[in-house]
Image: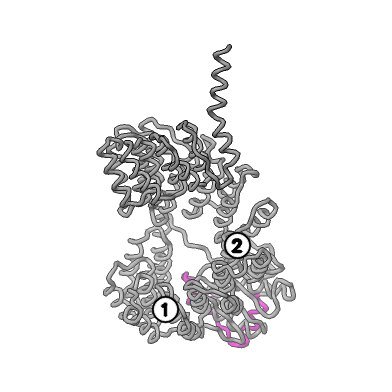
């Protein structure tokens, strides 16, 4: 009993200095450290964890006796707070007194840059610590963090290891994910499973994130299949219920074009109490382009949660608004930005310019730009893109002369696009030629694509072909599709085979090449050849994107497909269409039957033309004239593909008959029809 009591008293005496130090830890006064090294080390650790590194270091300096733990604890403290210079300096000083242990090596490596990491690796090799699992894992993480050659050194460190654990594989998979090498990450994961190592939540999270880079061609399909497999594993292990994993899955599904219904299901399966701002932002981002109305609905749901809104959420919401028909939602979101105090946030002002321009309100976009207290290159480029989208080439060129920042590659893409839409061949060629001469910017694929489009639209097909031949890089899908589109516009058949074969070679799953070729044949009355192309397209399982149009009436968006059979009021729409057609024909409307790409009688061709989605949307809007959703004298229609020649003529004359401005946004640009004329001057 006496021995036990004596032991207890000794323990109390031992920890009394540490308790006293804990009471005074918020003061700047440092008392003389106790002679007991263990207690002093605990105090250093305590200060380090609290981020009071100057107190930890001061206590360390005043210690009369130090051991390897003293040095290592302080080194670890500096490392945990990302202080590389004092950490490296302290480690170097320690070498004169003690041989570092594995914990000291690993702590220092966690903050090392490439140069100093190499030095530490060299010391680890000399002392034999490179074979210690803890140090080897830290080396792998350090090399991935500082890799400029796709992780070659990290792979060397990995291959040199005799024993690997879960942390080893997680470090490698995370590094591969950082470099968007999802295929290699999946291969390593399968190797890990074959070696009998069980994965954890970190493994799954890193693997899913690594698949975000597989977003082109066949890689996209492979990435989607891998994502589905990992999702299945997540369900089996219940890791998919964790917010971090669910967020990563939603992000990658969105990037790879997964089923939009799966996003929402995955989101709903997470615990409502665990949903954070990052998860809400991820699900809203996934819907922003494919179902923008759902993004706004989710935002209203999120506002019921006790979460702090940030500027990134509003940038996602404005992106969703940019994909809606009218500027009403963009204006409402602009008000929310002001109410929540995010005025004069550069990123949001840039997003507002983009949203207003895409919704058809170039005036609001200009107002936002000129009211900005600070502008960067993105601000200027956003306005240049807005002018290009609205066919205001002269305004874009004049605006370019006012720029007070150095232009970049995107600036010239916007300028060249403006020239392309306006048929300004001379101006576009001059801009292209002066890119490098005056601004030192080498033309990239996007710039060459614009030049091919400028020359091709204007009928200079041989010059467009010469541009392609002289390119210093291989032409991509966009360049060949621009050439093929020019061939269709001007009835050129000589270059069709070359351009179409290149398109199929670059992206065999894309329907655009097949559709353009078929249309060229049908426009030349070669219906057998056109039908053969369509049949071949169907045989390989490629489907054409259906023509769709959207219009907002009564604060509700209505969707129309060609034929309009799905709309509940289609019968009334057809009746009103007949009335409008009679009025249009009186002022000179003649159906452009060459736009019909099937070998049928002319009267059937006309009937097909009358059922195009944008015509149905216009008639439906006129049926609801006076409804608040019609916005007075302007009708706005959004379309997912390029407007055809007949619909263009129809809208142009309809604007004169109904006395309203009709704005149609197709896949390329805005067309503003008013008083029988279009803003594109019939050049698009």
Tag nearer the camera, 2 or 1:
2
Q: Is residue 167 left or right of residue 372?
A: left
- Tell whether position 579 is magenta: yes
Q: Residue at 55% of width from left, 53% of height from top?
A: 282
Residue 408, position in %: x, y?
Answer: 41, 73
| Corner quadrant of residue 128 | top left
In the rendered view, does 193 fall on the left or right side of 159? right
At 49% across and 34% down in the image, what residue appears? 34
Label 2 – label 1 distance at C-alpha = 30 Å
Residue 579's disc number: none
Q: Is-magenta flag for residue 18?
A: no
Residue extending farthest top: 1
Q: How is the image coloured?
A: one colour
Nearer-N-terminus badge (2/1): 2
| In the image: residue 91, left or right of residue 321 | left
Disc marking residue 416: 1
| Residue 287, percent from left and from top | 57, 57
Q: Residue 74 at x, y = what percent?
A: 44, 42
Q: Which residue is mark 2?
A: 314
Depth check, front residue: 355 or 119: 119
Quarter holding the N terminus is top right
Residue 674 vertical placement versus 139 (above, below): below
Q: Is residue 644 visible?
A: no
- The answer to whether residue 442 is above or below residue 80 is below
Image coordinates of residue 211 in percent, x first then y, are: 43, 49
Q: Residues within 10 Å of mark 1 (few under 14, many from 20)?
A: many
The magenta segment is 577-602
Asked whether residue 107 is in view, the answer is: yes
- What is the residue that sits farthest to the left in this orientation? 126
Q: Secondary structure at mark 1?
A: helix
């Amino acid at each position: 009993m006496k021995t036990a009591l004596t032991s207890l008293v000794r323990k109390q005496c031992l920890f009394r200095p540490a308790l006293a130090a804990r009471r005074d830890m918020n003061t700047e006064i440092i008392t003389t450290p106790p002679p007991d090294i263990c207690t002093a080390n605990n105090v250093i650790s305590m200060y380090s964890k609290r981020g009071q590194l100057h107190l930890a270091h001061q206590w360390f300096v005043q210690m009369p006796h130090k051991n390897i733990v003293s040095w290592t604890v302080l080194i670890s403290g500096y490392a945990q707070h990302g202080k590389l210079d004092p950490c490296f300096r302290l480690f170097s000083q320690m070498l004169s007194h003690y041989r570092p242990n594995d914990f000291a090596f690993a702590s220092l490596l966690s903050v090392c840059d490439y140069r100093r990491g190499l030095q530490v690796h060299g010391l680890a090799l000399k002392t034999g610590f490179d074979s210690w699992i803890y140090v080897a894992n830290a080396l792998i993480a350090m090399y991935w963090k500082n890799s400029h050659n796709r992780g070659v050194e990290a792979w060397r460190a990995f291959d040199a290891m005799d024993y690997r654990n879960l942390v080893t594989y997680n470090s490698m998979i995370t590094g591969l994910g950082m470099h968007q090498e999802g295929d290699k990450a999946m291969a390593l994961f399968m190797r890990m499973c074959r070696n009998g190592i069980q994965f954890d939540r970190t493994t799954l999270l890193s693997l899913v994130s690594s698949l975000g880079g597989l977003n082109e061609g066949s890689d996209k399909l492979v990435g989607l299949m891998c994502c589905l497999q990992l999702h299945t594993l997540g369900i089996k292990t219940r890791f998919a219920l964790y917010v971090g994993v669910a967020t990563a899955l939603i992000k990658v599904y969105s990037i790879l074009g997964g089923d939009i219904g799966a996003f929402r299901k995955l989101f709903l399966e997470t615990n409502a109490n665990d949903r954070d701002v990052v998860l809400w932002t991820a699900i809203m981002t996934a819907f922003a382009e494919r179902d923008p109305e759902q993004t706004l609905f989710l935002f209203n749901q999120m506002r019921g949660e006790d979460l702090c809104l940030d500027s990134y959420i509003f940038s996602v919401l404005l992106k969703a608004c940019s994909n809606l028909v009218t500027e009403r939602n963009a204006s409402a979101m602009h008000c929310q930005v002001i109410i929540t105090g995010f005025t004069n946030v550069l990123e949001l002002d840039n997003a507002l310019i983009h949203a207003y321009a895409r919704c058809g309100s170039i005036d609001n976009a200009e107002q936002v730009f000129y009211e900005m207290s600070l502008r960067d290159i993105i601000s200027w480029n956003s306005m240049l893109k807005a002018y290009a989208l609205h066919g205001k080439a002269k305004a874009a060129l004049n605006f370019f002369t006012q720029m007070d920042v150095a232009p970049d590659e995107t600036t010239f893409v916007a300028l060249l696009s403006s020239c392309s839409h306006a048929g300004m061949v001379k101006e576009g060629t001059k801009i292209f030629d002066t890119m490098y001469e005056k601004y030192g910017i080498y033309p990239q694929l996007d710039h060459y694509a614009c030049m091919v489009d400028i020359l091709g639209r204007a009928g200079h097909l041989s010059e467009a072909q010469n541009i392609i031949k002289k390119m210093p890089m291989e032409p991509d899908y966009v360049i060949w599709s621009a050439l093929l589109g020019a061939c269709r516009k001007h009835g050129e058949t000589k270059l069709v085979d070359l351009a179409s074969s290149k398109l199929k070679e670059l992206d065999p799953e894309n329907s655009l090449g097949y559709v353009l070729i078929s249309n060229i044949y049908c426009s030349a009355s070669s219906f057998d050849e056109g039908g053969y192309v369509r049949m071949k397209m169907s045989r390989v399982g490629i489907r054409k994107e259906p023509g769709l149009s959207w219009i907002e009436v009564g604060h509700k968006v209505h969707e129309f497909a060609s034929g309009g059979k799905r709309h509940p009021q289609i019968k009334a729409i057809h009746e009103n269409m007949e009335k409008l057609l009679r009025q249009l024909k009186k002022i000179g409307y003649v159906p452009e039957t060459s736009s019909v790409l099937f070998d049928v009688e002319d009267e059937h061709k006309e009937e097909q033309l009358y059922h195009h989605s944008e015509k149905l949307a216009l008639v439906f809007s006129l049926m609801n004239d006076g409804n608040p959703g019609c916005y007075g004298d302007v009708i706005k229609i959004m379309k997912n593909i390029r407007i055809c020649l007949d619909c263009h003529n129809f809208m142009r004359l309809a604007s004169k008959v109904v006395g309203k401005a009709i704005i149609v946004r197709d896949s390329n640009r805005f067309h503003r029809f008013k008083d029988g004329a279009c803003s594109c001057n019939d050049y698009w």
